[in-house]
Image (spheres, rainbow, N blue to C red):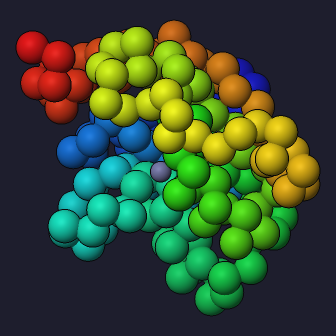
Amino acid sequence: MSNNATYMKLAIEEARNASWPFGAVIVKRGEVIATAGSGDGQDESHDPTAHAETNAIRRAASKLGSGDLSGTILYASCEPCALCFGAAWYGGIKKIVYGTALADIQSINKAWGGDLGFPHEHIQEAGITFEGGVLKEEVLEMYKSHPRVKASIS
Ligand SMILES: [Zn+2]
């Protein structure tokens, strides 16, 4: 299994066990330094910025004792929203790998996805490389079977 797939599986597990179907993992030189889900019980309750990615970024910075996360890779089950892309950029993260695109999940439940992302050309201009579609089918499977998604589309 490729490294991307290994870390994406971790992100999927985080998402499966969280209140919301989003998971993230931060890796530095092959070592997992933070994992998080969106609403995984370790984040601040009632914090609308506590997404899987921002949670993982906070935990990685805490672990490293620095807000400089350059040299790390952010893995996210879903394409990060504009908030999370911004947080990654502020942290100096230069590579982001994700499973589903926001457009993929928007076709399942309209409220999440779509235009919440950041234009890809701006991300590239900011010097961040990204790769989408890693284990996309597995992410979609997790997403569709997540209780929060089932409740939102029933
Ligand atoms: Zn986000």
Q: Is residue 70 visible?
A: yes
**On the rendered image, what quadrant is the N terminus found in?**
top right
Task: Examine the rendered structure and indicate whether residue 8 appears above or below residue 88.
Answer: above
Task: Tell me residue 103's x, y (percent).
Answer: 53, 21
Q: Which residue appears at 52% of the width and 34% of the height?
A: 115
Q: Is residue 13 visible?
A: no
Residue nearer the viewer, 27 or 39: 39
Query: Residue 63 falls in which quadrant of the image?
Result: bottom right
Task: Tell me residue 44's x, y (percent).
Answer: 26, 72
Q: Is residue 149 left or right of residue 94?
A: left
For the image, the number of numbered tags is 0
Q: Which residue appears at 59% of the width and 19% of the height?
A: 135
Outermost residue, bottom side: 65
Task: Tell me residue 32's x, y (percent).
Answer: 62, 56
Q: Is residue 42 left or right of residue 125?
A: left
**On the rendered image, what quadrant is the C terminus found in?**
top left
Task: Examine the rendered structure and indicate whether residue 142 appears above or below residue 130.
Answer: above
Task: Tell me residue 96's x, y (percent).
Answer: 72, 45
Q: Which residue appears at 63% of the width and 34% of the height?
A: 98
Task: Examine the rendered structure and indicate whether residue 143 appears above or below residue 42.
Answer: above
Q: Is residue 150 left or right of residue 25?
A: left
Residue nearer the viewer, 74 or 123: 123
Q: Which residue appears at 54% of the width and 82% of the height?
A: 62
